[in-house]
Amino acid sequence: MLFMVAGYLKPGAEERLIDFRNEFNEHLTQMPLVVAGVLRGEDGKRQGYLGFIEADSIDVAQRFVRDSPYFQEGLYDRVEVFKYDVEVGTVGA
């Protein structure tokens, strides 16, 4: 199943991301990642991350987010996980 995962950073968290970059990149290899990227505000600053992952259940997808170094370090203001059903377009084409 496909899940959308989004983490919205707390104000000021962008400066701390570099401290956990290697751990975060390693974490991303733990789950089949379809696509992921940075969410940026009008000022160009990083506001969060959005990705689509393949997981067996929403519980597994939520655990993936909770195990993120950024989540563990309290850098997110909020996170969201939703089951995602593709209605237009294709995945993996």
Image: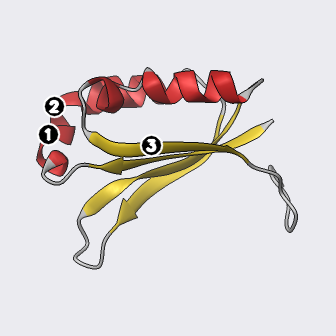
The residue that disc 3 covers is 79
Q: Is residue 44 left or right of residue 11?
A: right
Give whichever of 21, 79 is nearer the camera. 79
Q: Is residue 2 left or right of residue 32?
A: right
Marks 2 and 1 in Cβ contact (< 8 Å): yes
At 27% from the left edge and 33% from the top edge, which residue is drawn?
Answer: 21
Q: Looking at the rendering, in which quadrant would you find the N terminus?
A: top right
At 80% from the left edge and 49% from the top edge, which residue is drawn?
Answer: 92
At 31% from the left edge and 71% from the top edge, which residue is drawn?
Answer: 41
Three-letter amino acid code at disc 3?
Answer: Val
Spatial separation of the CA atoms under disc 2 and disc 1? 6 Å
Q: Looking at the rendering, in which quadrant would you find the C terminus?
A: bottom right
Q: Is residue 20 left or right of residue 57?
A: left
Residue 16 numbered tag: 1
Give the percent coordinates (x, y) of residue 81.
Answer: 59, 41
Q: Looking at the picture, does residue 32 appear above or below residue 77?
A: above
Residue 44 numbered tag: none
Three-letter amino acid code at disc 1?
Answer: Arg
Three-letter amino acid code at disc 2?
Answer: Asp
Give whichever of 57, 40 is nearer the camera. 57
**Res. 29 visible in picture:** no
The residue that disc 2 covers is 19
Give the percent coordinates (x, y) of residue 68.
Answer: 40, 26
Spatial separation of the CA atoms under disc 2 and disc 3? 20 Å
